[in-house]
Image (cartoon, grey):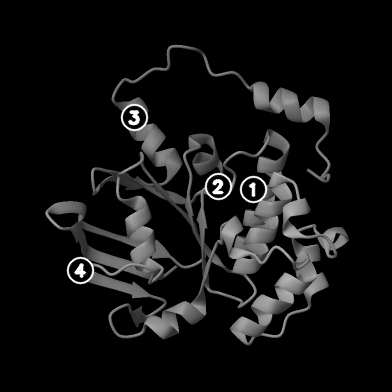
């Protein structure tokens, strides 16, 4: 794999406050990359700079071969950014919203086929506000792939979802990656990052303090002599919930 995102010595200052402190990392083409950290760690600022939504103070950022200082318009054409609820016109149904974004991107799209990809074809005539939490998140992700981006950014996509809806969304994210799209994800759920991400960068106080695969980071911790106070079981309560309520995809 080759790097599709390269960040070198990135700094972002707000007055005298240094939010991002000279970080460097690469995201490989075709991987699911997690950017993790507590609130205020600098991860959102970092992503907004890569997404061209915020100016950097210094450093170099390359996205799909384009320099962020020189090729903002080119970068916007190859990325997809997950929209929040406020990004959707309340009077339009899902098919109309897809067609609206299709026109904005100047990218012809079969609205029903796209909704089918995220298991929402039966909701084509529904408005966004009529969807459940899981359905809203799946639709939001659908809007990120209208322009057939090389990279999509997902900001805490499963926050507030029940266990069934979370796992359905994980399957969707894997399906999108399987088609060759690189995915950058932020999440506060460590189990989610462990399951989905090929590699994660952990930020704290504006710096990257660890970067590796979840398995390697766990192995490195165990090698220090760390032991969990409770034996890890072969299943957890979430597995019980899924098993009792059914594995099949359903309308959340």
Q: Secondary structure at mark 1?
A: helix
Q: Earlier in the sequence, mark 1 or mark 2?
A: 1
Q: Earlier in the sequence, mark 3 or mark 4?
A: 4
Q: Position of residue 224 (x, y in %)?
A: 28, 25
Image height of 96 relative to 12, above or below: below
**Residue at the spot 78% in from the left edge and 78% down from the top edge:** 110
Q: Nearer the viewer, mark 3 or mark 2?
A: 2
Q: Quadrant of the N terminus?
A: bottom left
Q: Quadrant of the C terminus?
A: top right
Image height of 100 relative to 40, above or below: below
Dot 2 corresponds to which residue? Answer: 196
Image height of 96 relative to 158, above or below: below
| Marks 3 and 1 close (CB-CB < 8 Å) | no
Q: Earlier in the sequence, mark 3 or mark 1?
A: 1
Q: Earlier in the sequence, mark 3 or mark 2?
A: 2
Q: In this orientation, which residue lies closer to the viewer: 90 or 204?
A: 90
Dot 1 corresponds to which residue? Answer: 170
Dot 4 corresponds to which residue? Answer: 59
| Marks 2 and 4 close (CB-CB < 8 Å) | no
Question: Could you tell me how far apart the alpha carbons at marks 3 and 2 are, in whole angstroms?
Answer: 20 Å
| Marks 3 and 2 close (CB-CB < 8 Å) | no
**Residue at the spot 54% in from the left edge and 40% down from the top edge:** 192
Q: Position of residue 92 (x, y in %)?
A: 75, 68
Q: Secondary structure at mark 4?
A: strand
């Amino acid at each position: 794999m080759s790097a599709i995102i390269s960040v070198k010595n990135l700094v972002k200052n707000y007055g005298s406050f240094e939010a991002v402190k000279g970080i460097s990392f690469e995201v490989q083409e075709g991987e699911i990359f997690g950017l993790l950290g507590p609130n205020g760690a600098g991860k959102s600022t970092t992503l907004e700079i890569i997404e061209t939504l915020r100016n950097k103070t210094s450093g170099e950022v390359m996205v799909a071969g384009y320099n962020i200082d020189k090729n903002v318009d080119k970068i916007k054409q190859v990325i997809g950014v997950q929209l929040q609820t406020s990004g959707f016109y309340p009077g339009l149904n899902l098919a109309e919203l897809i067609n609206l974004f299709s026109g904005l991107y100047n990218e012809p799209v079969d609205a029903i086929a796209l909704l089918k990809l995220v298991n929402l074809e039966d909701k084509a005539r529904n408005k966004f506000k009529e969807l459940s939490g899981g359905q809203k998140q799946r639709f939001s992700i659908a809007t990120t792939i209208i322009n057939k981006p090389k990279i999509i950014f997902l900001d805490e996509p499963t926050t507030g979802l029940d266990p069934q809806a979370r796992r359905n969304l994980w399957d969707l994210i894997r399906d999108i990656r399987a088609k060759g799209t690189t995915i950058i994800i932020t999440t506060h759920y460590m189990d989610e990052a462990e399951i989905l991400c090929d590699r994660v960068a952990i930020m704290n106080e504006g710096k990257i303090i660890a970067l590796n695969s979840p398995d390697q980071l766990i192995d490195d911790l165990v090698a220090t002599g760390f032991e969990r106070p409770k034996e890890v079981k072969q299943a957890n309560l979430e597995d019980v919930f899924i098993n009792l309520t059914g594995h099949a995809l359903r309308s959340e």
